[in-house]
Amino acid sequence: MSFQRTNSITGIEVADDTKITFLDLKRKKAHRYVIFRIDDKEKEVIVEKQGAPWESYDDFTAALPADDCRFAVYDYDFVTEDNCQKSKIFFIAWAPSVSRIRAKMLYATSKERFRHELDGVHYEIQATEPSEMDLQVLIDRAN
C-alpha cells in the first residue's frame, strides 16, 4: 500500500515513510515530535528529525532551523482540570521571516495538501517567529 501523493500545484510528493512516521507518533507515541522538510531534489516531503518521547517542547523548538521553513507535528500531553490525561497533536507550519522567499512560497503552496495527509491533527499553527508558537500558545489552544 503506497501513501505517496502528489501536490498538484507544486508537484511535491509525500514520501511513504513520512506518513508512517506520523502514524507512529499518533498511534504508538513513538515520537514527541517530527520535523519534515521538502527535499528540493526529490520534490517530496521527507522526515528530517524525530524527537524521542521524553524530549521537551524546548528541544523541539531548538531543532527547528532559525532561517528556513519546515513542517512539524508536536504531540502535546497535558492534564485537564478533571485530572484526565489528554494529548493533542499540533501541526506547525514554520516559516521564519528571514527564510528565502522561494522557500516560503514552496512551503505555503504545499501546506494544505501535506496537512491533509496527516489525519488526526487537532490544531494548526502558522508561525513566522518563535513567539507565535510559544508553549503557552499550545496550552491555550488545547484547553
Image (cartoon, rainbow, N blue to C red):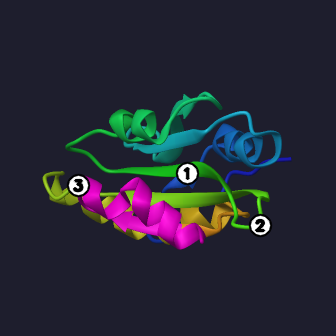
Pair 3/2: label in front: 2
Front residue (pair 128, 112): 128
Count of numbered circles on the image? 3
**Residue 110 appears anywhere in the view:** no
Residue ID at (62%, 43%): 15
Check disc 1: other Cα within 10 Å, few if <14, some if 14-19, many if 20+.
many
**Mark 1 is on which residue type?**
Val
Around disc 3, counting alpha carbons within 10 Å, would you say few (fewer than 14), some (14 to 19), or many (20 or more)? many
Task: Give the mark nearer the N terminus: 3 vs 1.
Answer: 1
| Residue 61 in picture, x, y percent from top left | 37, 42
Local SS, label 1: strand
Residue topped by disc 2: 82
Image coordinates of residue 136 in percent, x first then y, are 41, 60
Residue behind mark 1: 73
Q: CA distance from mark 2 to mark 1?
A: 26 Å
Q: Amino acid at mark 2?
A: Asp
Q: Amino acid at mark 3?
A: Pro
* Magenta residues, start to end: 124-143
Q: Which residue is mark 3?
A: 96
SS state under label 3: loop
Q: Residue at x 46, y 58 (%)?
A: 92
**Spot occupied by residue 7 in the image (x, y as percentages of width and height):** 53, 65
Identity of the residue drawn at 56% across and 49% down: 74
Q: Are marks 2 and 1 in contact (CB under 8 Å)?
A: no
Seen as rendered, the residue at the extreme right is: 1
Q: Is disc 2 surrounded by few (<14), some (14 to 19) or many (20+) residues within 10 Å?
A: few
Q: Secondary structure at mark 2?
A: loop
